[in-house]
Image: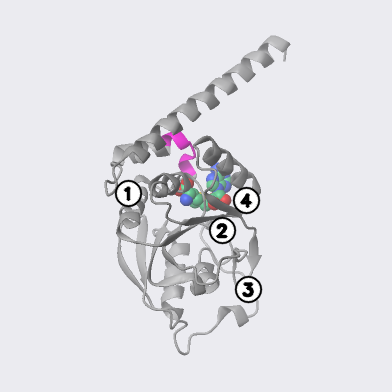
Amino acid sequence: MSFASQWVVRARHVASALRRDLALRRAVARVRRLRAGDAPSPSDLARLRAAFGNDGWSAGVPYLEELCRLVGQTHGAILECGSGVTTLLLAALTESDQRPVLALEHLPDWHARMRRDLFRLGAQGFDLRCLPLASYGAFDWYRRPLLPPGLLFSLVACDGPPGQTRGGRYGLLEVMSDHLADECVILLDDAQRESEQQVVRRWKERFRVVETHGCERYVALLLRGKEAPLPGAADPRSAPPRAVPVAP
Ligand SMILES: C[S@@+](CC[C@H](N)C(=O)[O-])C[C@H]1O[C@@H](n2cnc3c(N)ncnc32)[C@H](O)[C@@H]1O
């Protein structure tokens, strides 16, 4: 490639990055400008999702709408599993009241990209941690985050780790139950997939979890008290490691 063509390719790349940056800033600014208690409209959320530009991996607009609603209805700390456009949305929604949010990401490159986006949007203080997936015996999940004793999450945006992870998203309740509030709400994405349905079945067998509402793509679950695990439920951490079948 000639020097001139290399320059053109580079200029196009820079222009496209600037366009994305501007669209993302505008979309996040619309969410930030909302008065306390107002929820972003579906078109605001669609704009944010499009500007973020990770279509196949981003939660859908109905999930984002429900996340906004639940942020408004719950109090206390929020946990996010699997970062992306949901992270930018949570950062914008909680900025004014400084509500604590912890987001977990297992891919270093994706974590770096998210950190860059958060920094550019002025949310550099947002707690996004890069924690690799670790084995807990019969399942894998994020390495346990170091947290202040007594910190309780009242809402979990559960959209990671990815479906092909051993055990999928099952590890959330096993690994984090000490830090989940009584009546914690878990918003699980991709509920139409067999792997997520299997996770919900396994949670119900072992923990006091009920489905409250949902749609084709997501389900909201309520953790009913923390006397879990249920009597007689087998502890998968003591089971020999085995492959958990998950859908692609
Ligand atoms: C379903 S995505 C999480 C999406 C996030 N909640 C959102 O709505 O944007 C789950 C994980 O997939 C990984 N991921 C996200 N985008 C990806 C991409 N374009 N290619 C490969 N992995 C990706 C990240 O590790 C992320 O934590």
**Residue 42 place in picture, x, y as percent:** 30, 41
The numbered mark, 4 or 3, whose residue comes first in the sequence reads: 4
Q: Which of marks 2 and 4 is in front?
A: 4
How crowded is the residue under tag 3: few (<14 C-alpha within 10 Å), some, or many (20+)? Answer: few
Residue found 42% across the figure and 71% down from its top: 181
The quarter of the picture where the N terminus appears is: top right
Residue annotated with mark 2:
164
Residue annotated with mark 3:
242
| 232 w.r.t. 51: above or below | below
Q: What secondary structure characterizes most of the magenta part? A: helix
Q: In this view, does 71 lie to the left or right of 51?
A: left
How crowded is the residue under tag 2: few (<14 C-alpha within 10 Å), some, or many (20+)? Answer: some
Residue found 54% across the figure and 27% down from its top: 17
Q: What range is drawn magenta here?
A: 50-56
Residue annotated with mark 4:
107
What label does residue 81 carry, if any?
none
What label does residue 65 carry, if any?
1
